[in-house]
Image (cartoon, grey):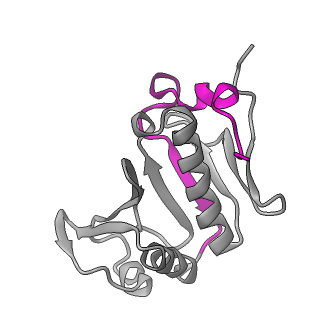
Amino acid sequence: MPHLLWDDVKNFFDPDLMGALPDLRVPGTSSADWQAVLDLVRSRGWSYAYSEDGVVVRLPRAEEIMSRGGRVDAVLHVRPAPGVLVIFRPHEAGAIDFDVDLRELQGQTGVDALCHLLRAVGRRLGKPVLLTPESDPLHPVLGYDVTADRVVLLADPGLG
């Protein structure tokens, strides 16, 4: 059974309402958590490309990325499913920030793909994963709930 149903959450997947690249965040993290995410990407066999200052290079360990203190523009593009692009931005150890393109996540298939991703990251870290509108990073609308072990609504989708 899906975590969320398209008809219940479609407003949260509307690029005009949420912005095309809403923000996803795991707060309260460390370099070890970033390494767990990198290990997750590799262990799941997800396609990925890591770049620094626009140049694709070998994916280093998280500790090495964090030691640069944001002096390089590090970006990790991951494809956890066909047609789904996730963009991780490893700039600081204290939070794992990433984006998804809502234009790729339409219909129930898109909802399921996002829920699968949030659950995989949240389970690996044992931490909540929050989705916020691009223009409103302080108000999450849905996220992975560690206790419930599922993606849940955190705001009213404004349907009805």
- For the residue pair 42 and 30, the one nearer the viewer reads as 42
- Residue pictured at 47% horizontal, 39% vertical: 105
User: Which residue is most to the top?
Assistant: 160
x and y percentages locating residue 140 in the rendered image:
66, 42
**Above or below for 114 versus 28:** above
Is 159 on the left or on the right of 121, as rendered? right
Residue 27 in view here:
no
Q: Is residue 40 magenta?
A: no
- Residue pictured at 70% horizontal, 20% vertical: 158
Residue 84 in view here:
yes
**Rendering quarter of residue 5:** top right
- Tell me which segment is drawn in magenta: 1-29
- For the residue pair 126 and 81, the one nearer the viewer reads as 81
**Above or below for 63 versus 114:** below
Number of disc labels: 0
- Residue pictured at 20% horizontal, 65% vertical: 53
